[in-house]
Amino acid sequence: MSEQLLQQTWDALQAREADIRNEFFEILISRYPEYLDRLAQPELLEAMGSIDNLLEMVTWMEQGSEERIPYIARLGALFREQGIDFEDMDRFRELMLEVLDRHGAEIVSGWSAQHLEAWNEAFELCLIPHLLDSMQDAA
Ligand code: HEM
């Protein structure tokens, strides 16, 4: 995973933080309205599309031990309790990439498939496996 590409896109996309977050949430709910019923507090999902939160999470996961990652145990327990699985996380990955690609192409100079792949790997190799592990630990 290229941390440099992640950092570069993050720096450039920060100006769009709020737009990206809102768009992620709106598309998610319009495409998968079932989350409104499945989750106890679906409005909390709005924080999920935050690139600040995602990048912060990648950094913790790359650098820290599992026990020291803030709120991972809480998220693991919450995901278990609400029946969230790999398929749900994969939907989030796909949707987030879609939104990032649109904004990236507009405002990141030299935006390429490699930038998108760096984000894809952040999800596939780091975020999703750690979240699945935290659900196992919450068992
Ligand atoms: C790709 C997978 C996912 C990643 C990287 C991820 C990341 C995060 C992050 C960083 C937060 C904390 C936001 C904050 O409080 O600052 C969060 C919270 C939350 N996530 Fe996820 N998430 C993923 C998948 C999911 C899925 C599939 C669902 C449900 C369908 C979900 C539901 C929630 C909820 C309800 C919260 C709020 C928890 C609370 O504050 O009590 N997440 N997630």
Image (tube, rainbow, N blue to C red):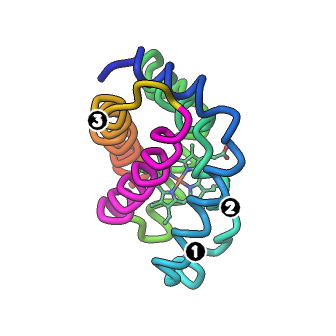
Q: Please rate how many residues cluster around mark 2, counting C-alpha atoms within 10 Å: few if below 14, some from 14 to 19, many from 20.
A: few
Disc number placed over residue 39 in the picture, else none: 1
Disc 2 C-beta below 8 A from ligand 1: yes
Q: Residue 22: x and y, percent?
A: 67, 58
Q: Please give the count of numbered marks on the rendered protein.
A: 3
Q: Nearer the viewer, residue 74 or 62?
A: 62
Q: Which residues are magenta?
A: 85-107
Disc number placed over residue 44 in the picture, else none: 2
The C terminus, quarter of image: bottom left
Residue beneath the point at 56% across and 75% down: 29
Q: Amino acid at mark 1?
A: Leu
Q: Is residue 102 magenta?
A: yes
| Secondary structure under the numbered disc 3 in the rendered image | helix
Dot 3 or dot 2: first in sequence order is 2
Disc 1 C-beta below 8 A from ligand 1: yes
Per the model, the C-alpha gap separating discs 3 and 2 is 30 Å
Tag 1–tag 3 contact (CB < 8 Å): no
Residue beneath the point at 35% across and 63% down: 85
Q: Please rate how many residues cluster around mark 3, counting C-alpha atoms within 10 Å: few if below 14, some from 14 to 19, many from 20.
A: few
The N terminus, quarter of image: top left
Dot 2 or dot 1: first in sequence order is 1
Q: Residue 83: x and y, percent?
A: 42, 70
Tag 2–tag 1 contact (CB < 8 Å): yes
Q: Amino acid at mark 2?
A: Leu
Residue beneath the point at 28% across and 41% down: 124
Q: Quadrant of residue 111?
A: top left
Label 3, on which residue? 113
